[in-house]
């Protein structure tokens, strides 16, 4: 099977994730979609690593996973505290950052 | 290595600024005395510079040169010519008077200021400005000059915006709003000028490969460095624009009346007599020195703008109702004369212009500081609020009159010498412009005498009836300035001797010779 | 001997410095210091004069160089003095009359609390005026020129609490500044033409430049002279200048400062000799002013303003004579000196009258004063006879010569015109001076108690005031005859001003005779109008000409409408332009940016999703751009 197919799959996953980030309002779902996009990137990295015959891509993918895990910790904490203060996990309710 | 005299002259006020700022909050009067002490020390050093400088010697003397940002060819290069020495002298001379005149301007109990350590800040900022101005008169590296040219805006901004004139019409809030408007206007005008200059500085580096004034000028003179005509003109315009904002030249002048009107009188003196001089000085040193051909190309347009400044400034001064704004417009008229003298490109014009910078500094300082004393007594800046002061405070009125007469260039006082030189120098090459500029002397008489008449003569107004005459501190400020005005009016030779060779160098930069008189030419 | 020249200026300058900076300590004795230093200056002048008399006429000029004033490449201005016969004449007149007026002022200003300052200003004036006449170059002359303007400003406005005085002072300075502009342009022209503005080199090389250039310089010098000497069209300040104390009017606005224009033209004779057109302009200005001043003098009821009109007119004679060239210079100066005596005397007399009349200046409220003030009456009367040119007195000798020279201006029509004008002027002079004389000293008393019930008690003035008047009366009577004896004055000046005998279009005895007839006619007419019937206390409406003359022939109205109003409109509209357009352009730019940022701000709506969209959009554009660049 040609490695290019993996790239197609990654593109599809990324598109789903991006669409989810843009149209969903629930913070948890948005969060999951971001994870989806990150994993799509991981998949491309691994694919390219395979195509080029070295391990650089795979190493970066590990880094990404570590960073993503850290991000989940911080992100979920923010969402939980937001939920506590507003009793809602909708991202549209948190629009205080405008001028 | 010899003692770095020029660095020291700039470093003393800079150290003074830090020391003054560090004085504990409760010891305000210590801060005042320290500031005065440091400014006097600077004056001493400036005198030493004047003595060590040999007018007949090299063009740039007392030079210092150290690598600074090696990757971009930026060096810490200092050196002074006669013009620089004269202006350093002026700056160092005026600052002690500015400090003395502003002795109580930043006292919290007098101004009701709730600012953090206002007195220390006020005097530290003045010394900071002095340090930067002095260093900019010494810098022969374009980049170093640029940085100072921009950096002096910061302390000036705080001086204008933070320590306003207590005499104002209307509420405190309104006054504060006007003050911050004036400060922001000052900052924005000069920043825009500086921004355009920055582009030109970078352009110059691209073309010339370094920032050294002397190296570039030498390379241009020897033909090693050729600039395309258009490049030179664009770079010239970039530099000139910044200097014209600072000078200020019509129509870039509108920040000055606001800034001078809202600032306290000593700060207004600092603006017009000291900081603005950097603009005209830089025209002589950088515009003519780096871009001789473009300077000649732009001369007609600049002369016309200068002429407009002269007449327009004077006419607007006639129409003012606010004493300080009137003086500001008068200054605009005078800066027109200075710029006209520089670009007339004759020895008389440029010597006159340099002398004019010095004399205008002294005469405006005298007039503005007395006006400040007057205003603080009455608590109003409006001309109409005064009348008959002469009767109650004759000494104050007398000094105000002498300041006014200096402003209208009465012969016997210093400004006459420089104004006449500028007029003669301009007339020799451009008779029509010279004649129109002569109308300026009638208008100058008009606005100064109208000011004097309305404030000082006539029946005594009720509000001024108890006005005290000048106090000792105020007399100490004014008397030396007046003495200097008379001395330099009768015997300007010390300054002209200093300036003449430098002007000769500048003229040879642009390869211009004085026009020969008709009769001699016929021989 | 040469080294004493600087002392002429230094003595009064020292006085001015001491008196003005000395403070209240000198209030009691200050006037003595001032008077003493004026007398010192006079003594030095006399000393130099006797020294000069001992020398050969061609080598009398003395020179003293002090220091280099403005040394700039190609431009040399020195502080150096030149004392020749012309300057000497002025020095003696200035210091002599000046000293007398210092003495007079001691009495006149006795009750003024600012007397010390008055003497300081007087000394300042003396110093500046002396500098003006002994400078050896035009730029230094200019310093004196403006210096006397300053002193005049300070003295006219001496009673500053009166708004009218302050305004008059300002007006005098401003009008003079217009003239000064002429002088500074003349100096600039000299500099570009000759490369110098020292008298010697300029006046010796006038033949080397074109007539056009000389005409230009001459006209500019004439403008300067018009300002300082109150000639048409810059005469409007002199009448108002009478706001100053009377000794000031006598010294500055009659005897000395206002004659500086005559000095300037005579001194620059070489320039005018080479420029007939400029000379014609000078003559016209002189002729117009002598009629103008005389007409104004006829209509004024204020004694000082009537005398001011007369001064204007007499200086018109001098300017006219100076414009005639070598046939007139000497007579111009001679009339200047005799006029200095009798006009100063007349003003001091007027001051004495005012002193006794509670500072009343309206002649309609005088009358019959000869009984109360005999000394003033006699001295004033002698001055009166001198000014109208009564045969044998000073004015006769000098004015008659000017009329002769005016008739000799040209063989043809010009000689007749200007000679005729000068003759007519003599008649009008006799008329208005007789009017002044009759209204003041003859007839019945017309004064009444003022609003507070204070009736004036006319009395003779103290001796410090009468002695100077007597001395000046002597000068008014004898100076002219003395100068004309053996043509001594003309010969004295000849090495400086040159001299040619005038050849009038009609014979000299005929001119003299007609002058006498005209003056008798003028005096008789005045007697008929004012001596035969009672003078009304309130002025009658008068003819159109009278009303115009009372308003200085509408000059001030013209100035007010055209210059003052026009200027006000101009400055007001410029203030508006500066605020709305020049400043407005910048503020408009700022407002434009402000509006733009307001729009852009709306993009920041705080929704995370919209930020995400812009991120995705931006990324997409970046990728597309990269791909496109690759493709190209």
Image: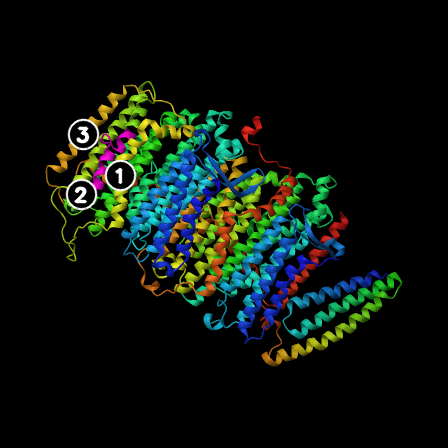
Badge 1 local density, few (<14 within 10 Å), some, or many (20+)? Answer: some
In this view, which residue lies farthest toward the front? C54
Q: Is residue C357 magenta?
A: no
Question: Do the numbered discs 3 and 2 sit on residues whose CB atoms are within 8 Å?
Answer: no
Total numbered circles: 3
Badge 2 local density, few (<14 within 10 Å), some, or many (20+)? Answer: many
At mark 3, the secondary structure is: helix
Q: Which residue is mark 2?
A: C440
Determine which of the numbered discs, if any, sits on residue C520 in the image.
Answer: 3
Query: Residue C300, percent across and down?
Result: 22, 41
Query: Residue C44, percent across and down?
Result: 41, 43
Residue C295 placement: quadrant: top left
Residues at discs 3 and 2 both on one chain:
yes
Residue at 58% from the left image edge and 71% from the top image edge: A96
Tell me the CA gap for discs 3 and 2. Answer: 20 Å
Residue B129 placement: quadrant: bottom right
Circle 3 or circle 1, nearest the eye: 1
- Magenta region, mostly helix, strand or loop? helix
């Amino acid at each position: 099977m040609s490695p290019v197919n993996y790239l197609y799959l990654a593109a599809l996953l990324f598109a789903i994730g991006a669409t989810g980030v843009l149209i969903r309002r629930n913070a948890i779902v948005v969060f999951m979609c971001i994870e989806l996009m990150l994993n799509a990137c991981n998949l491309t990295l691994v694919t390219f690593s395979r195509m080029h015959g070295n391990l650089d891509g795979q190493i970066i993918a590990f880094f990404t996973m570590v960073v993503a895990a850290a991000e989940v910790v911080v992100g979920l904490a923010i969402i939980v505290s937001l939920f506590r203060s507003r009793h809602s996990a909708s991202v549209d309710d948190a629009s205080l950052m405008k001028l | 290595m010899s003692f770095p005299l020029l660095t020291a002259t700039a470093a003393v006020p800079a150290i003074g600024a830090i020391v003054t700022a560090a004085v504990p909050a409760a010891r305000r009067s210590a801060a005042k005395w320290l500031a005065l002490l440091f400014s006097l020390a600077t004056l001493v050093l400036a005198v030493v510079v004047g003595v060590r400088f040999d007018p007949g010697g090299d063009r740039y003397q007392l030079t210092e040169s150290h690598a600074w940002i090696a990757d971009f060819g930026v060096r810490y290069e200092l050196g002074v010519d006669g013009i620089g020495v004269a202006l350093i002298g002026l700056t160092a001379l005026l600052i002690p008077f500015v400090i003395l005149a502003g002795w109580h301007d930043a006292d919290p109990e007098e101004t009701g200021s709730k600012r953090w350590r206002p007195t220390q800040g006020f005097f530290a900022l003045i010394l900071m400005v002095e340090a930067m101005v002095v260093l900019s008169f010494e810098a022969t590296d374009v980049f170093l000059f640029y940085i100072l040219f921009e950096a002096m805006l910061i302390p000036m901004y705080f001086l204008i915006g933070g320590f306003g004139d207590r005499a104002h019409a209307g509420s405190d809030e309104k006054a504060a709003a006007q003050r911050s408007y004036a400060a922001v206007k000052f900052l924005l005008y000069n920043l825009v000028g500086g921004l355009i200059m920055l582009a030109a500085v970078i352009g110059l580096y691209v073309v010339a490969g370094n920032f050294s004034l002397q190296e570039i000028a030498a390379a241009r003179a020897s033909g090693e460095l050729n600039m395309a005509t258009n490049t030179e003109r664009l770079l010239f315009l970039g530099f000139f624009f910044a200097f014209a904002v600072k000078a200020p030249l019509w129509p870039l002048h509108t920040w000055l009346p606001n800034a001078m009107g809202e600032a306290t009188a000593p700060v207004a003196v600092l603006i017009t007599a000291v900081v603005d001089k950097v603009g005209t000085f830089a025209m002589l040193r950088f515009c003519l020195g780096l871009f001789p051909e473009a300077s000649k190309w732009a001369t007609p347009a600049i002369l016309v703008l200068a002429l407009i400044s002269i007449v327009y400034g004077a006419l607007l001064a006639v129409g003012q109702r606010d004493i300080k704004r009137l003086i500001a417009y008068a200054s605009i008229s005078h800066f027109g004369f200075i710029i006209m003298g520089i670009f007339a490109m004759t020895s008389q014009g440029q010597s006159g212009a340099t002398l004019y910078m010095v004399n205008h500094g002294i005469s405006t300082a005298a007039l503005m500081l007395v006006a400040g004393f007057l205003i603080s007594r009455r608590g109003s800046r409006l001309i109409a609020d005064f009348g008959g002061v002469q009767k109650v405070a004759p000494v104050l009125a007398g000094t105000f009159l002498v300041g006014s007469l200096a402003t209208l260039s009465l012969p016997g006082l210093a400004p006459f010498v420089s104004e006449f030189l500028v007029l003669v120098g301009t007339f020799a090459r451009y008779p029509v412009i010279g004649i129109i500029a002569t109308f300026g002397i009638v208008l100058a008489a008009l606005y100064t005498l109208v000011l004097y008449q309305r404030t000082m003569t006539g029946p005594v107004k009720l509000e001024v009836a108890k006005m005290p005459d000048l106090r000792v501190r105020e007399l100490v400020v004014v008397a030396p300035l007046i003495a200097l005005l008379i001395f330099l009016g009768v015997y300007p030779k010390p300054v002209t001797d200093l300036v003449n060779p430098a002007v000769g160098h500048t003229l040879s930069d642009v390869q211009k010779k004085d026009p020969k008189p008709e009769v001699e030419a016929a021989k | 001997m040469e080294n004493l020249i600087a002392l002429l200026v230094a003595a009064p300058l020292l006085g001015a410095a001491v008196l003005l900076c000395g403070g209240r300590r000198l209030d009691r004795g200050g006037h003595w210091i001032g008077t003493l230093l004026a007398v010192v200056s006079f003594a030095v002048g006399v000393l130099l004069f006797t020294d000069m008399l001992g020398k050969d006429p061609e080598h009398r000029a003395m020179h003293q160089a002090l220091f280099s004033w403005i040394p700039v490449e190609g431009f040399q201005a020195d502080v150096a003095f030149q004392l020749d016969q012309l300057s000497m004449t002025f020095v003696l007149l200035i210091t002599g009359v000046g000293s007398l007026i210092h003495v007079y002022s001691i009495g006149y200003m006795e009750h003024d609390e600012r007397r010390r300052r008055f003497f300081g200003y007087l000394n300042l004036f003396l110093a500046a005026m002396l500098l003006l006449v002994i400078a050896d170059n035009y730029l230094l002359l200019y310093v004196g020129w403006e210096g006397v303007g300053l002193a005049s400003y300070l003295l006219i406005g001496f009673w500053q609490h009166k708004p009218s005085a302050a305004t008059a002072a300002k007006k005098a300075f401003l009008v003079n500044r217009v003239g000064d502009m002429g002088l500074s342009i003349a100096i600039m022209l000299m500099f570009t033409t000759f490369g110098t503005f020292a008298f010697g080199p300029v006046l010796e090389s006038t033949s080397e430049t074109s007539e056009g250039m000389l005409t230009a310089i001459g006209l500019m010098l004439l403008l300067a002279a018009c300002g300082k000497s109150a000639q048409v069209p810059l005469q409007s300040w002199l009448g108002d200048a009478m706001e100053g104390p009377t000794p000031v009017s006598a010294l500055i606005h009659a005897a000395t400062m206002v004659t500086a224009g005559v000095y300037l033209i005579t001194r620059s004779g070489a320039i005018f000799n080479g420029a007939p057109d400029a000379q014609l302009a000078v003559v016209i200005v002189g002729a117009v002013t002598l009629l103008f001043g005389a007409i104004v003098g006829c209509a004024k009821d204020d004694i000082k303003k009537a005398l001011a009109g007369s001064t204007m007119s007499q200086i018109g004679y001098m300017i006219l004579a100076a414009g005639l060239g070598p046939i007139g210079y000497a007579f111009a100066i001679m009339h200047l000196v005799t006029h200095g005596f009798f006009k100063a005397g007349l003003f001091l007399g007027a001051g004495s009258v005012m002193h006794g009349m509670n500072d009343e200046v309206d002649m309609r409220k005088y009358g019959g004063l000869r009984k109360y003030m005999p000394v003033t009456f006699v001295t004033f009367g002698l001055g009166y006879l001198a000014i109208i040119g009564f045969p044998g007195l000073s004015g006769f000798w000098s004015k008659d010569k000017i009329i002769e020279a005016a008739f000799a201006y040209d063989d043809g029509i010009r000689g007749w015109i200007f000679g005729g004008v000068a003759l007519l002027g003599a008649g009008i002079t006799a008329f208005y001076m007789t009017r002044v004389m009759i209204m003041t000293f003859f007839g019945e008393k017309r004064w009444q108690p003022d609003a507070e019930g204070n009736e004036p008690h006319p009395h003779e003035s103290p001796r410090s005031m009468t002695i100077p008047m007597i001395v000046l009366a002597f000068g008014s009577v004898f100076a002219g005859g003395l100068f004309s004896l053996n043509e001594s004055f003309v010969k004295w000046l000849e090495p400086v001003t040159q001299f040619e005998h005038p050849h009038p279009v009609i014979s000299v005895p005929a001119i003299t005779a007609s002058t006498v007839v005209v003056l008798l006619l003028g005096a008789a007419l005045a007697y008929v109008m004012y001596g035969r019937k009672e003078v009304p206390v309130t002025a009658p409406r008068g003819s159109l000409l009278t009303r115009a003359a009372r308003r200085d022939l509408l000059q001030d109205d013209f100035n007010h409408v055209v210059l003052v109003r026009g200027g006000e409109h101009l400055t007001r509209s410029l203030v508006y332009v500066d605020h709305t357009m020049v400043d407005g352009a910048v503020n408009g730019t700022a407002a434009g940016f402000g509006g733009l940022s307001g729009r852009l701000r709306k993009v920041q709506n705080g929704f995370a999703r919209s930020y995400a969209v812009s991120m995705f959009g931006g990324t997409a554009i970046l990728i597309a751009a990269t791909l496109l660049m690759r493709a190209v």
